[in-house]
Image (cartoon, rainbow, N blue to C red):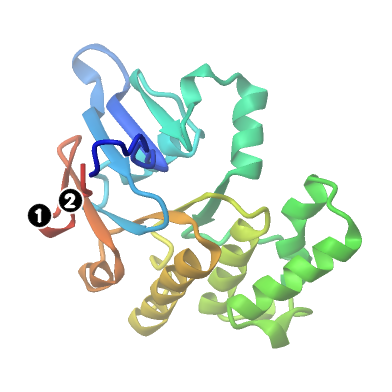
């Protein structure tokens, strides 16, 4: 770097510092996380790898502001979550973080388009803007011809695509996905993971995707392992300092 270059490196999208989370107390306490620390670079798809029950969901909930740690801290887009009250956390989750779950979480009586539109209505976005954004997202996830179909009329893979589109509705900077392919067959799961990778590129978001499916790891930019309450980067995917 030139001597007169005063620029600073881009801050990570997520910074986790010495994170601890336990359930229960005393001899019966379960230590889900034991001093976890890592940075997530911006604009990348990061796979969180771990066996079932390893604490992946606990970690995702802490990063997304759905839970609070016993100690340590999480910064999302340079915002310290521990400094936010409940209203601040709600605003963060609504405006800056998108969630995709294994169980889809769609409203059965609403159409695909209406499900995607829900976060925009909560933010009181104008009707014209809502319609434009929903149309674009349906096209992005390959469901432009299924806007009026309800979840029960869609396949599992299509329902997950709707949930991804809904998670992107408010243009989040961070997308968190908890085993998004867990209820899908291998081919459909691969297609959904490829979609997430394409979304990261087109929407310029950072995605943290929990999975224990080794076939899907090759699609990630980096792989973060979680075992025995601690994390480590796969050797060839360590973020640059």
The image quarter containing residue 71 is: top left
Question: Percent x, y for residue 213?
Answer: 26, 66
Residue 79 vs residue 70: left or right?
A: right
Residue 151 visible? The answer is: no
Q: Residues within 10 Å of mark 2 (few under 14, many from 20)?
A: some
In the rendered image, residue 228, in percent from the top left (x then y), is placed at 15, 37
Looking at the image, which residue is at 56% across and 72% down? 161
For disc 1, the marked residue is 235
Question: Which of the pair 198/53 is nearer the observer?
Answer: 198
Q: Residues within 10 Å of mark 1 (few under 14, many from 20)?
A: few
Question: In the current view of this chain or complex, which residue is farthest to the top?
Answer: 26
Helix, strand or loop for disc 1: helix
Image height check: is 149 above or below 162? Answer: below
The reply to whether residue 125 is visible in this rendering is yes
Q: Is residue 27 left or right of residue 209?
A: left
Along the viewing direction, whichever of 62 and 84 lies nearer the viewer: 84
Pointer 1 and pointer 2: residues touching (CB < 8 Å)?
yes
Q: Which mark is residue 178?
A: none
Say above or below: 157 vs 90.
Answer: below
Q: Closest to the observer: 213 or 136?
A: 136
For image coordinates 67% across by 25% down, the residue present is: 87
Q: Circle 2 sits on which residue?
A: 238
Most extreme residue toward the left is 235
Q: Residue at x 73, y 63 (%)?
A: 115
Q: Is residue 183 above or below residue 47?
A: below
The image shows residue 187 at horizontal and vertical percentages of 36, 84
The image quarter containing residue 25 is top left
């Amino acid at each position: 770097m030139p001597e007169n270059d005063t620029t600073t490196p881009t801050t990570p999208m997520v910074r986790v510092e010495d994170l601890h989370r336990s359930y229960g107390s005393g001899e019966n306490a379960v230590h889900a996380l034991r001093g976890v620390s890592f940075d997530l670079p911006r604009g990348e798809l990061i796979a969180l790898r771990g066996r079932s029950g390893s604490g992946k969901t606990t970690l995702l909930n802490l990063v997304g502001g759905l839970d609070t740690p016993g100690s340590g801290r999480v910064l999302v887009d340079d915002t310290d979550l521990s400094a936010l009250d409940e209203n601040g956390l709600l605003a963060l989750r609504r405006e800056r973080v998108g969630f995709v779950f294994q169980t889809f979480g769609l409203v059965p009586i609403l159409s695909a388009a209406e499900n995607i539109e829900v976060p925009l209505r909560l933010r009181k976005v104008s009707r014209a803007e809502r319609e434009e954004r929903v149309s674009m997202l349906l096209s992005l996830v390959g469901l432009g011809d299924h806007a009026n179909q309800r979840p029960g009329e869609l396949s599992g893979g299509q329902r997950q695509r709707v949930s991804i589109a809904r998670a992107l509705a408010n243009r989040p900077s961070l997308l968190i996905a908890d085993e998004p392919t867990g209820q899908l067959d291998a081919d459909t799961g691969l297609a959904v993971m490829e979609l997430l990778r394409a979304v990261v590129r087109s929407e310029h978001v950072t995605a943290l995707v929990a999975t224990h499916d080794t076939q899907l790891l090759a699609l990630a930019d980096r792989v973060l392992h979680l075992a025995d309450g601690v994390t480590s980067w796969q050797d060839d995917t360590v973020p640059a300092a």
